[in-house]
Every structure is written in C-alpha cells, then in structure tokens.
Amino acid sequence: MSRRPPGRATRQILSGSELHPSPKSVGGRKSEGEPIAVAFWYLVALAVLVVISSIVWSIWGMGVASPFLLILSIGYVASWLVL
C-alpha cells in the first residue's frame, strides 16, 4: 500500500473518554459551583410573571393584572430582540 499524500483528509476515531460536550451547551455544564446562564434566570423571571399575573387576574380581575401583563409583554419583546 502506498502512503496517502499529506493534503488528503483522514478520519480520526476517538474513544468515548476523549469526547467532551461543549461548555456552552446545557449538558456540558457542571452543576456544582458554576453559575447558571443569565438567559435562564431571565426566562425563569418571565415564567414567574406569567404565574403571578394569572393568579392576580383570577382573583382581582384584569384591571389589577394589567401592570403585570405590561411588564410581561415588555419582557417577551425584549427576549425576542435580545436572546
């Protein structure tokens, strides 16, 4: 057999111990000692606003829930533009 020319691509077989997930992915983060992404906390805050506004709307009505819904809608638009 002849040796391949140096410009030709070859395949490399990696074992499982040599493969690591990307640190940017959710699965690649260690749960101990590393901070959670700001985007995650932002989405958690929006979810809390959904729950608060639905509870306030069901108890006191739409008039009282309007400020919460306004903040929620601004948060949704901001997440659509930024995230």
Image (cartoon, rainbow, N blue to C red):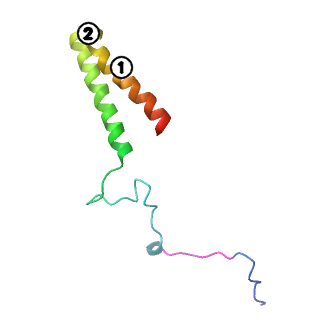
Q: Is residue 12 left or right of residue 80?
A: right
Look at the picture and state if 46 lies above or below 28. Answer: above
Q: Nearer the viewer, residue 59 or 71?
A: 71
Q: Is residue 12 left or right of residue 44?
A: right
Q: Nearer the viewer, residue 75 or 47?
A: 75
The kind of secondary structure the magenta stretch mainly shows is loop
- The quarter in which the N terminus is drawn is bottom right
How packed is label 2: few (under 14 Cα within 10 Å), some, or many (20 or more)? few
Q: Is residue 47 left or right of residue 4?
A: left
Q: Amino acid at mark 1?
A: Leu
Residue 32, percent from left and from top: 26, 60
Residue 41, percent from left and from top: 32, 42
Q: Is residue 67 left or right of residue 83?
A: left
Q: Amino acid at mark 2?
A: Gly
Looking at marks 1 and 2 on the same chain, the residue that comes earlier in the sequence is marked by 2
Say which quarter of the image contains residue 42. Answer: top left
Nearer to us of marks 1 and 2 is 1
Residue 40, percent from left and from top: 36, 43
Look at the picture and state if 60 lies above or below 2. Answer: above
- As drawn, the label of residue 48 is none
Residue 74, percent from left and from top: 40, 25
Q: Residue at x 45, y 63 (%)?
A: 21
Q: Residue at x 34, y 24 (%)?
A: 71
Q: Which residue is mark 2?
A: 61
Q: Residue at x 36, y 49 (%)?
A: 37
Whole-Å distance between the Cαs marked 1 and 2? Answer: 15 Å
Residue stretch in magenta: 10-15
Dot 1: element? helix
Dot 2: element? loop
Q: Which residue is mark 1?
A: 70
How packed is label 1: few (under 14 Cα within 10 Å), some, or many (20 or more)? few
